[in-house]
Amino acid sequence: MLGLKLPTDPRWATIVEKNIDEILIDHAHCELKAAATASSLIISFPEYSELVTEMVALAKEEMSHFKMVHDRLLKKKCSTWT
């Protein structure tokens, strides 16, 4: 399905399980950075309407992803996030 070239190390799930809050927080920051980068490109190149259209769509998608991760962090009552 994902087209991975190598099998995932089974120890990965254990590592994730022990560090899920940190991973979710990092993921939230990555989603925000992606949305910010798309916004920055819009600001830098407003004359390129095709680029603007694509970056608006990307920023919306990334902010939607951020909201999902943020909601999960709030639901978990992650102390380092709130």
Image (cartoon, rainbow, N blue to C red):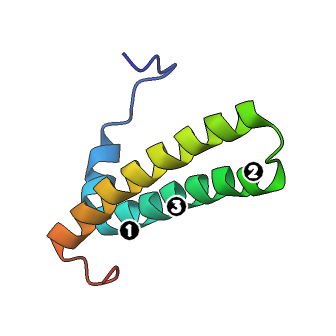
Disc 1 crowd rating (10 Å Cα; few below 14, some 14-19, many 20+) is some
- Relative to 10, is 40 on the left or the right? right
| Residue depth check, mark 2 versus mark 3: number of the one nearer the observer | 2
Residue type beneath disc 3: Leu
- Which residue position holds label 2? 41
Disc 2 crowd rating (10 Å Cα; few below 14, some 14-19, many 20+) is some
Q: Disc 1 vs disc 3: Cβ atoms closer than 8 Å?
A: no
Q: Please report the residue visible at 39 percent of the width from the left and 31 percent of the height from the top.
A: 8
Q: CA distance from mark 2 to mark 3?
A: 14 Å
Q: Secondary structure at mark 1?
A: helix
Q: Secondary structure at mark 2?
A: helix
- Which residue position holds label 1? 22
Q: Disc 2 vs disc 1: Cβ atoms closer than 8 Å?
A: no
Residue type beneath disc 1: Glu
| Residue depth check, mark 1 versus mark 3: number of the one nearer the observer | 3
Residue 36 lies in quadrant: bottom right
Earlier residue among tags 2 and 1: 1
Earlier residue among tags 2 and 3: 3
Residue type beneath disc 2: Leu
Query: In the image, which disc is placed on residue 32?
Result: 3
Task: Return the residue nearer the eye: 67 or 15.
Answer: 67
Q: CA distance from mark 2 to mark 1?
A: 29 Å
Q: Quadrant of the N terminus?
A: top left
Q: Please report the residue visible at 74 percent of the width from the left and 35 percent of the height from the top.
A: 49
